[in-house]
Amino acid sequence: MLFLSTAVVALFLAVETAVSLRHERALRARGAVEPPDDVHRWMRMAYPGCFIAMIVEGLWRGQPPVPVWWAGVALFAASKALKIWAIHALGPLWSFRVLVLPGAPLVTTGPYRRLRHPNYVAVAGELAAVALMFGAPVAGPVSIVGFGWLMRRRIAVEEKALTGRSDIETEK
């Protein structure tokens, strides 16, 4: 089950990366701008690093109890469904980077009707799910807290960029 889980996690990461890169190129070609204070360079290392750490810990510790694995699978599926919905709502505006297309309206459809940042809710769910799927009681919480800190900074950067506000603090 751990090897199948690893393959599924890697496949989703590869597909999301390909979609993000395609959207990024198109957005830049259309004049999108990236804020200078983004934490993307840290996130692009930490995001896959979190998964790798949890997978390695899980392979070292061995298979978690089957009910825990299934709980992780269910949470992963729900998190991916939310993320796919968010990506679909943003369409070609979605990428791993904060790229703001001048004049584009703020997206308020799909999960954005109810949540301001559904993609980050989904990412937190993915991290918790993989921690369960791989039985990673150390790397899981460390990944969630560490990447959560980066997401908090990223959200501040996004809010500032999308609303044009300069009073949002990004250094907390």
Image: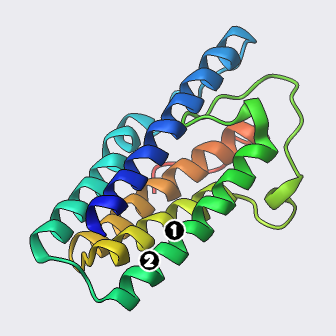
Q: Is residue 67 left or right of residue 1?
A: right
Tag 1: residue type?
A: Phe
Q: Measure the alpha-carbon separation of dots 2 and 1.
A: 6 Å
* Number of numbered discs visible in the structure rendering: 2
Q: Is residue 127 left or right of residue 61?
A: right
Tag 2: residue type?
A: Gly
Please determine whether, in this image, residue 100 is positioned above or below residue 135: above
Residue 72 disc label? 2
Residue 153 placement (x, y as % from top left): 50, 52
Please determine whether, in this image, residue 168 is positioned above or below residue 58: above
Q: Secondary structure at mark 1?
A: helix
The residue nearer to you, when weighing 99 against 140, is 140
Residue 15 placement (x, y as % from top left): 52, 37
Residue 105: tell me if it is visible: yes
Residue at horizontal 64%, vertical 50%? 168
Residue at horizontal 25%, vertical 54%? 52
Q: Is residue 75 left or right of residue 3?
A: right
Please determine whether, in this image, residue 96 is positioned above or below residue 168: above
Q: Could you tell me which quadrant the N terminus lies in?
A: bottom left
Q: Is residue 168 left or right of residue 116?
A: left
Residue at horizontal 72%, vertical 52%? 86
Q: Could you tell me which quadrant the C terminus lies in?
A: bottom left
What's the coloring here?
A: rainbow
The residue nearer to you, when weighing 38 against 125, is 125
Would you name the residue on which mark 1 appears?
Answer: 76
Quick one: which residue is furthest to the left in this view? 60
Residue 104 placement (x, y as % from top left): 86, 29
Residue 169: tell me if it is visible: no
Residue at horizontal 40%, vertical 44%? 43
Circle 1: is it few (<14), some (14-19), or many (20+) Cα within 10 Å?
A: many
Q: Are marks 2 and 1 in contact (CB under 8 Å)?
A: yes
The residue nearer to you, when weighing 157 against 131, is 131
